[in-house]
Amino acid sequence: MNFKGTLPTLILEALERESNHGYRIAQRIKERSQGVLDFKEGTLYPALHKLENEGLVESFEGIEKGRPRRYYRITESGHGMLAKDRAEWRTLSRAVTLILGEA
Amino acid sequence: MNFKGTLPTLILEALERESNHGYRIAQRIKERSQGVLDFKEGTLYPALHKLENEGLVESFEGIEKGRPRRYYRITESGHGMLAKDRAEWRTLSRAVTLILGEA
DNA sequence: ATCCTATGCATAGGATAACGAGGTATTAGA
DNA sequence: TCTAATACCTCGTTATCCTATGCATAGGAT
């Protein structure tokens, strides 16, 4: 089960405190949502590349367990975008909840 | 500003108490969300036709101010779907709010 | 020793949702 | 008379997500 349009925001949130690599970001989203949100790899990696193209995240190479990993870190503009996205999420979710009934 | 994937649910909700025609449904969604949600006609009518194809709403012809209008009413299965959609909305919005922070 | 699962990254093809732009037509008011 | 609002509709484009697939390695089970 997933929520269209929220993935970029959730990725930025995942990178807010610490840099991470793609696979771990996806796991983190799943865990933090208690298994509800589960974005697939075919969705995650293109989204990550897009965020990088837009300058909202940067990637660098790291090594974990002797093997190369592609790590991502959030940029300045990424922090700004996250703040906007959070505000937008609140506005929209309140609007829908207003109509469908209290959560 | 809009929320991908919520339109069918919002349409069903709009028809829950009273039948209505397309244009009025869109206005209702906008009003009830205090102007936040604003689905365009190019989105609304195809969504309405799809719901009809799926048997979740039925249409009939009515007359308002001497001119024909296409009215929609929610069906039995439409009510069932609305209940499911409401539950799903709560699950998903809670999951996202859990990650992004309280509304 | 081999197989499966999980990890980890990536792309291709298809479905769906929404948007903008355009078309048609009527009514009410300036 | 012209414009805005009402009312319905379709088409082409873009974005998002999914499934399927490919490649590769590590660790545990058989």
Image (tube, coloured by chain):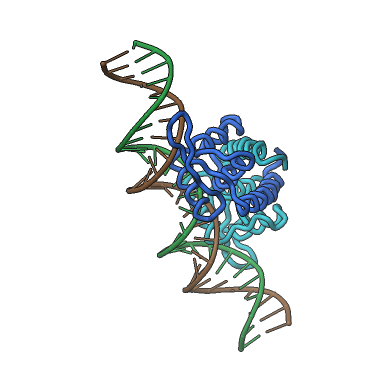
Chain colours: A blue, B cyan, C brown, D green
Q: Is residue B18 visible?
A: no
Q: Pinpoint residue B49: horizontal percent, then vertical percent.
A: 49, 53
Counting from the top left corner in percent of width and height, residue B100 is at: 66, 41
Query: Which of the 4 quarters of the picture holds residue C2?
Result: top left
Give whichever of B93, A70 is nearer the camera.
A70
Quadrant location, the C terminus of chain B: top right
Residue nearest the observer in this picture, B64 or D2: D2
Number of on-image labels: 0
Question: Can residue B13 be seen by looking at this rendering?
Answer: yes
Task: Identify the image quadrant of the N terminus of chain B.
Answer: bottom right
Front residue of B26 and D7: B26
Tell whether B52 sits left or right of D20. Answer: right
Residue B92 placement (x, y as % from top left): 61, 38
- From what the image shows, is residue A8 above or below residue D29? below
- Check the image and report above or below for C22 versus B24: below
D8 lies above or below A78: below
Is B57 on the left-hand or right-hand side of B86? left
In the displayed structure, does residue A64 sit left or right of residue B1? left
Residue C10: quarter of image: top left
> Going 50% across and 44% down the picture, which residue do you hit?
A60
The x, y position of residue A82, in whole percent, is 64, 49
Name which residue lies at 64% across and 40% down. A17
